[in-house]
Amino acid sequence: MVRTLGSFVRCESPSRDKRAVDRLGEIVAAEWRKRDAKVRVLAVAKLGNQVRAEIDLGSGPGTKQQIMILGHLDTVYPLGTLAKTPFRISGGRAWGPGTFDMKGGLVLALFAVDALKTVGITCSKRLVFLWTSDEEIGSESSRPAIETEALRSAAVLVLEPSFGRDGRLKTARKGVGTAEITVTGRSAHAGVDPEKGVNAVQELALQIERLMKVSNRRRGISVQTTVVAGGTVSNVIPEHAHAEVDIRFSRAADGPRLNRKLRTLGPITKGARVEIRGGTNRPPLERTAAVRALFRHAQSLMHDMGLPLGEASTGGGSDGNLTAALGLPTLDGLGAVGDFPHSPREHIIIRALPERAALLAGLLATLRL
């Protein structure tokens, strides 16, 4: 498993580099062909291609029922990161960019299928593995394929990283959005005739203050201004200002409300113009009765192995948000156990790899939805 992980990590795959992501996709597709899967590469024009692998472990030809296993090929790291933080083994951990988020999950899927084949356990449903190419940048190109495949499925298992060093599954995720605020004012000399200007930076500050009041911790709503730019030189009233806003929300019903709120943000300063773009783009993964039932089933499998398994909610989004919003029972965080995603200290715990592969194999073999 570690050798396979190393081959994946050494193939860097930043989201916006199509050639790099496609190289990893070819490596992953080749691994599935070795396991006699029916592999289709779903071509994408500008971003990386997606890989779909279908395998029948006893469900019989022509069965209409399937389980979808979902993950992504892309990472947040630019080409060249590997030279600074190479793949290495130390202290019972595998270190390197993308080990935890989520090339470890790609490995688990392969070895879960190997385990089922070796033991001769059959599955009552077809297994469809979909590896997308742009999850880290919003899944715009892969969303149609995700939703199409999900609607054919009885359940969705997401191989995103687990939560915490004890490997908890993710039974709730916040919805996610990004908005851009562009303010246009009027430039003037800041000392000679400031009254002739309309200060775009000042207007933007007032808009940010207004947005801060939208956050509601009790309802799980967080609106944070994360990027700000404006002005040219210190003695000129700024004509332009720009901000990017991160949006998180726990309840599906709050998504449309937040979008409506953004659309009603008119100017506060006389003479200023305010333009809002974007809004919510991923619905939340809510902890429904179906999600709870899936988690309890996974927990019982780990209990049979003599191992604990907990659950958690997280503010981060994944493609599991998209499948959950369609009403599909979705269990997330089934990937590797580790820490520090999206950082130079990213790593996974090696001894947990076979445990997680066994959990996934157990789910594939026993789900009767």
Image: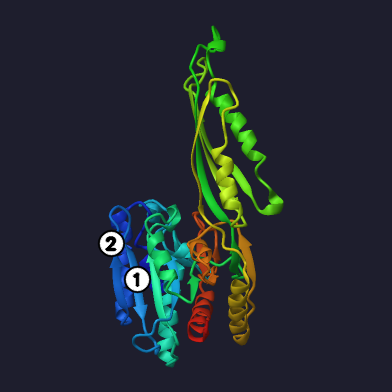
Residue 202 falls in image quadrant: top right
Instruction: Find disc 2 in the rendering and name its residue.
Output: 43
Q: What percent of the width, then of the height, locates residue 205? A: 60, 30
Residue 163 falls in image quadrant: bottom right
* Total numbered labels placed on residues in the image: 2
Q: Secondary structure at mark 1?
A: strand
Q: Secondary structure at mark 2?
A: loop
Amino acid bearing label 1: Arg
Q: Earlier in the sequence, mark 2 or mark 1?
A: 2
Residue 309 appears in the figure: yes
> Closest to the observer: 359 or 144?
144
Left or right of residue 216: residue 231: left
Amino acid bearing label 2: Ala
| Residue drawn at point x = 54 percent, y = 71 percent | 331
Neighbor class of circle 2 (other Cα within 10 Å; few <14, some 14-19, many 20+) is: few
Q: What percent of the width, then of the height, locates residue 234? A: 52, 18
Residue 9 appears in the figure: no
| Residue drawn at point x = 54 percent, y = 39 percent | 263
> Closest to the observer: 110 or 205?
205
Instruction: Find disc 1 in the rendering and name its residue.
Output: 52
Q: CA distance from mark 2 to mark 1?
A: 11 Å
Q: What percent of the width, then of the height, locates residue 75? A: 42, 57
